[in-house]
Amino acid sequence: MEWSEELSGGLLLAAPDAILVLDEGVIVLANDRAEELFGYPRAELLGRPVGMVFTDDSRAMHDEREPIGAVATSVRRKDGTEVPVESTSAVVDTPHGRLAVSVVRDLTDRAHAEQEKARLRAETQVHRSQRLESLGQLAGGIAHDFNNMLGVIVNYANFVIEEAESAEPDVKMIMADARQVIRAGERGTDLTHQLLAFARREVVRPQVLDLNTVIGEVEEMLRRSIGEQITLIVRPGAHLPPVTCDPGQIEQLLVNLASNARDAMPSGGNLVIDTEAHDDQVRMRVSDSGRGMAPDVVEHAFEPFFTTKASGEGTGLGLATVYGIVTQAGGEVSIASSPGLGTTVTVLLPAASGSLSAPDLSDSAPVKGRGETLLVVEDEAALRDVAGRILSGAGYRVLAAECGPEALELAAAHQGAIDLLVSDVVMPGMLGKDLAERLCVVRPETRVLYMSGYAQPVLHTHGTLDPGVALLEKPFTANDLLIAVRRRLDG
Ligand SMILES: Nc1ncnc2c1ncn2[C@@H]1O[C@H](COP(=O)(O)OP(=O)(O)OP(=O)(O)O)[C@@H](O)[C@H]1O
Ligand SMILES: [Mg+2]
């Protein structure tokens, strides 16, 4: 086939890249894309040295005497802007002599993508170091708070012993001291709950629920905790779609926000909680008429351990926890506040598609045992002891073991039935899951309840626990334990 003018013209026109033909470094042919890429009309390109359109350091690459393959370089457009390109050259012998053909591809898009990637990488780096920094703060803060609580516990427990050993033990004093121990322990439990919620490790049991109902259930408790000088006003929105949340977490969120509001209104004021349906979201606002926040406080308010309160008065985890809870539920939280004008915290939660879950029974009265036999396996002696005492006190027969192998031995030696295995999940030597499997081979009728400080999703992803098993989160109250055991036995 003869190469016609029309055919080469068509090729030049159809090519997606700029094409230049060079004769001794001078442009003798340029296609339309070349005009666009270089920003010169064709008339200004033809007859000019190719160096005109390439940046200084790349001119040498476009010489037909030195044929080279593809190179990344850049061109300078007529308007002075530089464009990254990939230039591929070849040398052809024609009846008119040796010519070089350069195909120049615009890399702007690719360059943008690369820049974007680099920017994201840098951003991630910054986030990571910020995270590390707040982790450091977190560890320091926790250590400090726990030290205080442990100090209280150890000292008061010593007082209890001293008093009990004295010639005339004062029972009232012993009880008062023991109560101090309990109070410190409860504060510790609250703190770990806060931390776990903040770290999103807590066992969350999301349910489809009505936010107004949850608010109604904690209203009285909030009213009591904010004191009489503050008026609590609840304005439940009509036709509120349900949301998917853990009711305990919503409660925690409200408690945290209410306690902030109380601290901001030392001489009284109003605390308003309202809800409203907002397209496919549910909006909940918690507003106070307190002292408000300066912009720089608003900016840092959600950060863990950010507090403007005196040392020992606030841990700075309240809003960080609120943030953790809301984002975990797929929602958003924001603060509007200015000094003297009060504060509004707005929470937006996605509306759930499902229908309302059955009410949780966890608030019902403690449930008793009917002489069933439980095998309790826990490597931490104090906790094993506590669980054993709670359960035998409630009317169960308790066999206790500190590890899997010991539990299997106990079970082998035990004559009667073992109705329920209550086991820690992560124990040295044998995991709770492996213990349960081996026990159920010999005693298929034995049911299983796990206890763990780890969240169910975490245990699942690591294969430490199968989905769908019964799990009791630590730390638990006597009531939590009794309810979980009763449910597992009856369920
Ligand atoms: N409703 C509010 N009005 C005014 N300031 C607030 C309000 N809520 C939060 N703040 C400010 O934000 C800071 C952080 O609040 P956050 O609840 O996270 O911690 P905290 O209340 O200081 O301590 P914690 O809640 O752990 O006891 C507070 O110290 C306070 O300065
Ligand atoms: Mg707070």
Image (cartoon, grey):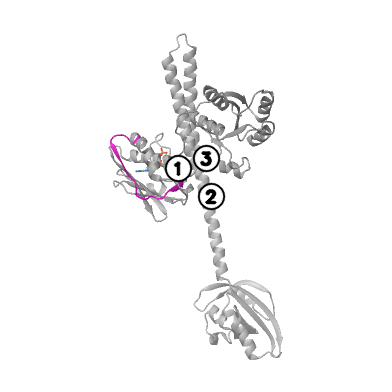
Q: Is mark 1 within 8 Å of ligand 1?
A: yes
Q: Is residue 23 above or below residue 242?
A: below
Residue 49 seen in render: no
The numbered disc on residue 321 is 1
Q: Amino acid at mark 3?
A: Val
Crowding at mark 1 (Cα within 10 Å: few <14, some 14-19, many 20+): many
Residue at 64% across, 91% down: 5
Q: Earlier in the sequence, mark 2 or mark 3?
A: 2
Depicted 17 relative to depicted 321: above or below: below
Between 169 and 207, the one nearer to me in the picture = 207
Side of 424 relative to 326 (left or right): right
- The spot of residue 490 in percent (x, y) is 55, 32
Q: Quadrant of the N terminus?
A: bottom right
Under tag 2, what secondary structure? helix
Is residue 338 visible in the rendered structure shown here? yes
- Contact, mark 2 vs mark 3 (Cβ under 8 Å): no
Residue 212 drawn at (x, y percent): 38, 44
**Which residue corresponds to mark 3?**
203
Q: Which residues are magenta?
A: 225-247
